């Protein structure tokens, strides 16, 4: 509320999937404008989901991505090539031998090197403010 008790507006940005469901929603307080770089980063990150990767915090296009957890190491080898991902050694996995999949694995950005000036349109994602 403002100084006289009136409600203040918030600004939201929505990224919609082709089936008109919400893929992401970002809400900003009235005192802060929308960050279009962050909105575009979210669209880029959502596109990578189709390639079997997830984007970590502070990720930017071209940075390494995280291999989707449901993939076993064998499936990840198939998808990204033999040695196409790096396993992060975690204390919780140090004594477990012969794991079928590791919790945290990084791979290169599947879209690195590609230039797509119409990324949101090609992925079927729509941006609304």
Image (spheres, rainbow, N blue to C red):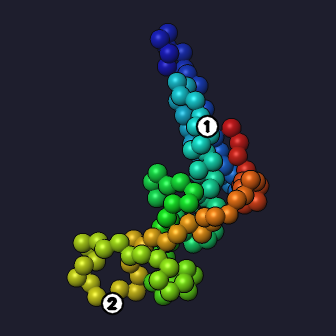
Please name the residue shown 24% across and 72% down the image: 91
Query: Can residue 36 be seen here?
Result: yes
> Does residue 75 show up?
no
User: Which quadrant of the structure image shows residue 53?
Assistant: bottom right
Callout 1: SS: strand
x, y percentage for residue 22?
Answer: 65, 52
Q: Quadrant of the C terminus?
A: top right
* Marks 1 and 2, how far apart at CA: 46 Å
**In this rendering, position of residue 25 left or right of residue 125:** left
- The foreground one among 94 and 2 is 94
Residue 86's label in the rendered image is: none
Q: Is residue 27 above or below residue 80?
A: above
Circle 2 packing at 10 Å, graded few (<14), some (14-19), many (20+), is: few
In the picture, measured across the screen, residue 97 lies left or right of residue 103, that is: left
The residue singled out by tag 2 in the image is 98
The mark nearer the N terminus, 1 or 2, is 1
Residue furthest to the bottom: 98
Mark 1: few, some, or many residues within 10 Å (few <14, many ≥20)? some
Q: Position of residue 44 (x, y in %)?
A: 62, 56
Q: Which mark is residue 12?
A: 1
């Amino acid at each position: 509320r403002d100084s006289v008790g009136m409600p203040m507006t918030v600004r939201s940005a929505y990224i919609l999937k082709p089936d008109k469901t919400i893929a992401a929603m970002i809400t900003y307080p009235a005192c802060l404008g929308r960050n279009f770089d962050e909105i575009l980063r979210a669209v880029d990150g959502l596109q990578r989901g189709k390639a079997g990767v997830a984007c970590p915090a502070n990720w930017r296009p071209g940075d390494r991505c995280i291999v989707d957890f449901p993939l076993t190491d064998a499936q990840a080898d198939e998808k990204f090539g033999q040695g196409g991902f790096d396993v992060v050694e975690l204390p919780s996995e140090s004594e477990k031998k012969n794991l079928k999949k590791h919790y945290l694995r990084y791979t290169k950005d599947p879209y690195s090197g590609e230039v797509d000036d119409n990324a949101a349109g090609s992925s079927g994602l729509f941006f609304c403010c």
